[in-house]
Image (cartoon, helix red, strand yellow):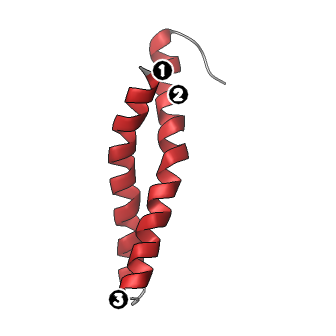
Amino acid sequence: MFRMMMMILHSVIATTLMGVGITGVLAAGMTGSRPIIIAAAIGFVLSIPASWLVARQITHLTSGKQTS
């Protein structure tokens, strides 16, 4: 169940972080394809631990366990 929740969250979080990265690159004036692809890749990689943390928190909160 945890893996499925993490994969679903990853699709949403990855899209968001990739979009933020691409928007930042374009706002900085870097309009080439290489900076855009790098920003999207960084957003994708950063979304993996973020989705794991969010899924873990949801799992702990719904199972009745307290996290510190």
Residue appearing at x 46%, y 74% in the figure: 38
**Disc 2 vs disc 1: Cβ atoms closer than 8 Å?**
yes
**Disc 2 vs disc 3: Cβ atoms closer than 8 Å?**
no
19 versus 68 height, above or below: below
Q: Quadrant of residue 28?
A: bottom left
Q: Which residue is the extreme one toward the top? A: 64
Mark 2–mark 1 Cα distance, whole angstroms, equals 5 Å
Q: Which residue is mark 2?
A: 56
- Expressed as whole percent of the image width and height from the top left, the position of residue 2 reads 46, 24
- Which of the image's four quarters has the C terminus? top right
6 versus 66 height, above or below: below
The kind of secondary structure element at disc 2 is: helix
| Residue 51 badge | none
Residue appearing at x 45%, y 65% in the figure: 41
- Expressed as whole percent of the image width and height from the top left, the position of residue 12 reads 32, 46
Q: Which residue is mark 1?
A: 59
Mark 2, other Cα within 10 Å: few <14 / some 14–19 / many ≥20? some
Q: Which residue is the extreme one toward the right? A: 68
Mark 2–mark 3 Cα distance, whole angstroms, equals 37 Å
Nearer to us in this view, 12 or 65: 12
The reply to whether residue 9 is in sight is yes
- Expressed as whole percent of the image width and height from the top left, the position of residue 49 reads 55, 44
The kind of secondary structure element at disc 1 is: helix
Callout 1 amino acid = Thr
Mark 3, other Cα within 10 Å: few <14 / some 14–19 / many ≥20? few
Decide if residue 64 is on the left or right side of residue 4.
right
- Expressed as whole percent of the image width and height from the top left, the position of residue 62 reads 44, 15
Q: Which residue is mark 3?
A: 31
Callout 2 amino acid = Arg
